[in-house]
Image: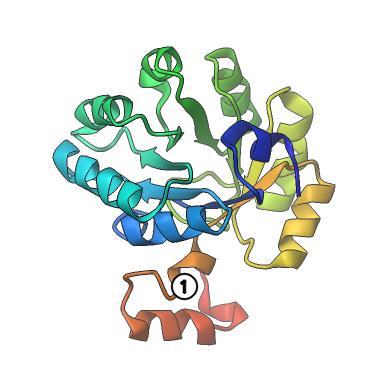
């Protein structure tokens, strides 16, 4: 399946694995990329050299493109950003606003995560290559709009490709956001339960067995 995002990232399927802190490490990122998606290493609050190690371990497992999710809340974010450039990572996600000029100069694709139309438009002005529009159903640092309400508004507001995230875990969700104009999906929880995920089996089992009322805000 070809979309603007598969062309942008050089991947086979428009599926991106979320950059989940302390879950999205090299095993998971490499496994997703190896089968045609786009894996992400979550830098979280890790020191820069730990992120460098994760990048190099992922490179040892796959020659397919993958990226790094950067949080500006990480006190090591500036050093992490430099490591990403030095290691020639394909793309960055998260909230990399202050580093966009450096990433663009290095030829790294910049895909910020946004939770509002205003932020999506701001990121486009700053030179982002695409945005992840993330509804409140997602984890991490998010806004208050639902995915299905947010996606079409962001698609209408910007000219760059939009990736949908938040509460998408199967083909039905993928089809739904595609109809709303998204060029790809980003999924987190679905990959937490993957065999390649380092999360404990007990936690994976809780996710698999969870009912509708088990998720609360």
Q: Residue at x 49, y 66 (%)?
A: 191
Is 98 or 68 nearer to us in this picture?
68
Horizontal side of residue 82 vs 185, given as left or right? left
Q: Which scheme is used to colour this image of the protein?
A: rainbow
Give neighbour class at mark 1: few <14, some 14-19, many 20+ (Cα, 10 Å): some
- Residue shown at 57% from the left, 47% from the top: 144
Q: Name which residue lies at 42% across and 12% down.
A: 105
Q: Nearer the viewer, residue 35 or 106?
A: 35
Residue 207: percent from left, percent from top: 48, 79
- Compared across the picture, whether 169 is left or right of 111 comes to right
Whether residue 117 is situated above or below residue 163 in the rendered picture: above
Q: Position of residue 124 (x, y in %)?
A: 60, 19
Residue linked to disc 1 = 194
Asked which quadrant contains residue 182, the reply is: top right
Q: Quadrant of residue 168?
A: bottom right
Give SS at disc 1.
Answer: loop
Instruction: Classify 87 as above or below 170.
Output: above
How many numbered discs? 1
């Amino acid at each position: 399946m070809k979309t603007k995002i598969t062309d942008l990232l050089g991947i086979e399927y428009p599926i991106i694995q979320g950059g989940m802190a302390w879950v999205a490490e090299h095993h998971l990122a490499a496994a997703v990329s190896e089968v045609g998606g786009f894996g992400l290493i979550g830098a979280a609050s890790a020191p820069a050299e730990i992120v460098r190690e994760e990048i190099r371990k992922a490179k040892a497992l796959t020659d397919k493109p993958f990226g790094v999710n950067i949080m500006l809340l990480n006190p090591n974010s500036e050093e992490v950003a430099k490591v990403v450039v030095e290691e020639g990572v394909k793309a960055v996600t998260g909230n990399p606003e202050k580093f966009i000029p450096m990433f663009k100069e290095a030829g790294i694709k910049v895909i910020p995560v946004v939770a509002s139309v205003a932020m999506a438009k701001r990121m486009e002005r700053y030179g982002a290559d695409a945005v992840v529009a993330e509804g409140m159903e997602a984890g991490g640092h998010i806004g208050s709009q639902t995915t299905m309400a947010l996606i079409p508004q962001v698609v209408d507001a910007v000219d760059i490709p939009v990736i949908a995230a938040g509460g998408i875990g199967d083909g039905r969700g993928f089809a739904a956001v595609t109809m709303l104009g998204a060029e790809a999906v980003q999924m987190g929880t679905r990959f937490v339960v993957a065999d390649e995920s380092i999360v404990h089996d007990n936690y994976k089992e809780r996710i698999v067995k969870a009912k509708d009322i088990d998720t609360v805000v």
